[in-house]
């Protein structure tokens, strides 16, 4: 079967910033199916990193990079966009000609490549799928944007940011509520997100495929652990990660240092905002920016922390840390959709003092940290492989094709 993948950026491999979900699912299915990738690219550097990664060979038979939208919209288009309360990524009203050209390019590609199925990655790309093409289509939202906006609205104190979050919530509800009109299947990475999609509309068929982890890449190896080293990873330009870093440094880290004065907190990830970079002025706080490989930072840490307060979906960073056998302290929201238990694979804490106390406990009790890390690794090995997630997606696709065409995919 030939599958067209529409993505808002070049898919991240396990060694690149961002979620490796799309790439790993495609890699699993590419053993039996052919993939054509139509994508934007946020930078030439990212595109070259993708092409130069040895794991990308034989996954996509063709890659086409889409032209970016025009840099500015004409005045009427901008007003039309606002009247429709369109999401920031929608081009239909701001750049109508561009919007039509991308939809037409997809139609041409489907005909020329004899596409059997369209796989859309993330909400931003749904706008370009024309139902009149009459090809089975699925969308993998990863997370529900409606849920994310709801949580951001609840957590935000600034009235300007609350207005922005509210407008984002309106557009997210509108878009996610119409998915059933175009897509045969809507996929999320947690049952929490799936339930939100189901409440927005009774039409779409939904499925949860949780995230996996590349256990070969994020393997547990013998590494010299640095005493009192704490690590948090992620794309630090992403608002929930920025908030988590700020929260830990301002509210939790001082409580940790009161009992462990030599504690060091490392914020590892690309695109740190000015607020995050400024945290290096605080003693014991390190901000790396983009690194070639996050694994040495995590492997050398005593404790991995995930202090997220907003966000949705399954967090790859948690699974990666557990695959490297790291003791983890996290907020409850950080493990949404994961089959993890407090005091078994992870320590959970939702207020600063409790979070700090549990971090200190692991810093002072080596056996407890080793036991937690071993339990996390065992859970990942048993339940969170990309191969298993690929099989779930394969079964779902077969069901769609039989329903649409009366036969299983080629």
Image (spheres, helix red, strand yellow):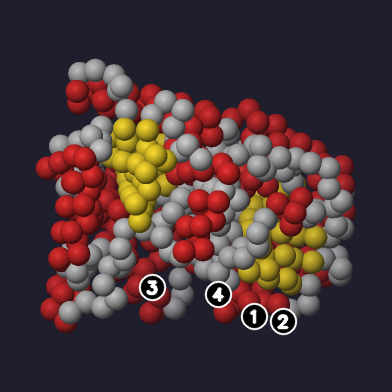
Q: Which mark is residue 217?
A: none
Q: SS for tag 4?
A: loop
Q: Which mark is residue 162?
A: 3
At horizontal 64% and vertical 45% (from top left) the residue drawn is 320
Q: Is residue 202 left or right of residue 24?
A: left
Q: Give the Cα separation between the discs numbered 3 and 2.
A: 29 Å
Q: Quadrant of residue 308?
A: bottom right
Q: Earlier in the sequence, mark 1 or mark 3?
A: 3
Q: Is residue 249 left or right of residue 28?
A: right
Q: Which mark is residue 281?
A: 2
Would residue 91 be seen by someone viewing this image from the given angle? yes
Residue 291: x percent and y percent?
65, 62
Q: SS for tag 3?
A: helix
Q: How busy is the neighbourhood of tag 4: few (under 14 within 10 Å), some, or many (20 plus)?
A: some
Residue 400: x percent and y percent?
27, 27
Q: Earlier in the sequence, mark 4 or mark 3?
A: 3
Q: SS for tag 2?
A: helix
Residue 385: x percent and y percent?
57, 33
The label nearer to you, 3 versus 2, is 2
Q: Identify residue for label 1.
A: 278
Q: How busy is the neighbourhood of tag 2: few (under 14 within 10 Å), some, or many (20 plus)?
A: few
The label nearer to you, 4 versus 3, is 4
Q: Earlier in the sequence, mark 1 or mark 4?
A: 4
Q: Earlier in the sequence, mark 3 or mark 2?
A: 3
Q: Give the Cα separation between the discs numbered 1 and 3.
A: 24 Å
Q: Give the Cα separation between the discs numbered 1 and 4.
A: 9 Å
Question: Does residue 80 sit above or below 129 in this rendering?
Answer: below
Q: Quadrant of the N terminus?
A: top left
Q: Identify residue for label 4.
A: 273
Q: Give the Cα separation between the discs numbered 4 and 2.
A: 14 Å
At horizontal 61% and vertical 74% (from top left) the residue drawn is 276
Q: Is residue 80 left or right of residue 44?
A: left
């Amino acid at each position: 079967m030939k599958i067209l993948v529409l993505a808002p950026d070049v898919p991240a491999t396990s060694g690149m910033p961002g979620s490796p979900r799309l790439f790993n699912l495609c890699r699993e299915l590419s053993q039996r199916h052919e993939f054509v990738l139509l994508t934007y690219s946020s930078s030439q550097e990212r595109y070259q990193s993708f092409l130069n990664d040895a794991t990308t060979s034989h996954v996509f038979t063709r890659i086409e990079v889409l032209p970016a939208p025009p840099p500015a919209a004409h005045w009427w288009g901008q007003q039309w966009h606002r009247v429709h309360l369109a999401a920031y990524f929608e081009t239909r009203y701001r750049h109508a000609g561009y919007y039509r050209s991308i939809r037409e390019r997809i139609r041409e590609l489907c005909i020329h490549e004899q596409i059997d199925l369209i796989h859309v990655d993330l909400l931003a790309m749904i706008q370009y799928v024309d139902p009149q093409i009459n090809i089975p289509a699925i969308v993998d939202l990863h997370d529900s944007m409606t849920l994310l906006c709801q949580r951001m609205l609840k957590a935000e104190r600034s009235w300007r940011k609350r207005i922005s979050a509210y407008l984002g919530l309106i557009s997210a509800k509108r878009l996610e509520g119409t998915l059933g009109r175009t897509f045969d299947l809507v996929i999320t990475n947690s049952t929490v997100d799936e339930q939100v999609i189901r409440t927005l509309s009774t039409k779409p068929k939904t499925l949860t495929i949780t995230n996996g982890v590349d256990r070969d890449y994020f393997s547990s190896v013998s590494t010299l652990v640095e005493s009192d080293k704490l690590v948090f990873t992620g794309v630090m330009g992403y608002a929930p990660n920025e908030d988590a870093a700020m929260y830990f440094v301002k509210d939790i880290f001082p409580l940790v240092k009161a009992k462990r004065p030599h504690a060091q907190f490392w914020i590892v990830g690309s695109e740190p905002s000015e607020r995050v970079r400024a945290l290096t002025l605080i003693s014991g706080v390190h901000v790396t920016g983009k690194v070639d490989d996050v694994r040495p930072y995590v492997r050398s840490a005593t404790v991995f922390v995930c202090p997220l307060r907003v966000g949705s979906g399954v967090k790859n960073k948690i699974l990666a840390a557990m695959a490297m056998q790291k003791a983890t302290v996290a907020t409850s929201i950080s493990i949404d959709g994961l089959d993890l238990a407090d005091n078994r694979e992870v320590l959970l804490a939702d207020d600063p003092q409790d979070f700090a106390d549990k971090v200190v406990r692991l810093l002072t009790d080596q056996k407890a940290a080793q036991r937690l890390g071993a339990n996390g690794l065992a859970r990942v090995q048993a339940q969170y492989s990309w191969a298993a997630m690929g099989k779930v997606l394969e079964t779902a696709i077969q069901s769609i094709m039989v329903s649409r065409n009366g036969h299983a995919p080629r």
